Amino acid sequence: MLVVGGESLVDLISEVCENNNSLSFVAHAGGSPYNCSIALAKLDNEVGFLCPFSKDNFGDFLLKPLLKSGAIALLEKRVAAPSS
């Protein structure tokens, strides 16, 4: 098993709403170790990701693609701290 340790984070990318000139934000899952874990799993490697996930909505947002890729979240207990 390959073990990848490091951050998972949410990048909020701003977009201008043309109808009222306000800003909206689109969330994108990110963090180099997080993305590497997903890529390695998609290449049929057994991968464990060593980083806690928050109990918040962004934690759910980050965990879903990781698990879908086949990578394993090695820290099963979710934390109360907010997502990065």
Image (cartoon, helix red, strand yellow):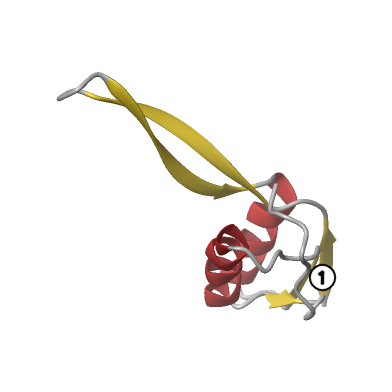
Element class at badge 1: strand
Could you classify mark 1 by the number of other residues whose Cα lies within 10 Å: few (under 14), some (14-19), or many (20 or more)? few
- Number of marks drawn: 1
Q: Quarter holding the N terminus?
A: bottom right
Three-letter code, disc 1: Leu
- How far across and down, in percent of the image, does residue 15 sit? 35, 28
Which residue is more in the foreground, 31 or 55? 55
Camera-side residue of 68 and 10? 10
Which residue occupies the foreground of this view, 77 or 39?
Answer: 77
**Quarter of the view holding residue 2:** bottom right
**Which of the 4 image quarters holds residue 72?**
bottom right
Give residue 30's position: percent from left, percent from top: 61, 47
Q: State the image coordinates of residue 21 (x, y, percent, origin top left).
A: 24, 18
Q: Is residue 16 left or right of residue 68?
A: left
Residue drawn at (63%, 70%) of the image = 41
Q: Residue at x 50, y 47 (%)?
A: 28
Residue extending furthest top?
21
Q: Residue at x 62, y 63 (%)?
A: 56
Question: Can residue 43 be seen from the camera position used here?
Answer: no
Residue 26, above or below 8: above
Q: Which residue is farthest left?
A: 19
Q: Is residue 78 visible?
A: yes
Rendered position, 84 above or below 45: above
- Residue 79: horizontal and vertical position, in percent? 78, 68
The residue under label 1 is 2
Nearer to the camera, 35 or 18: 18
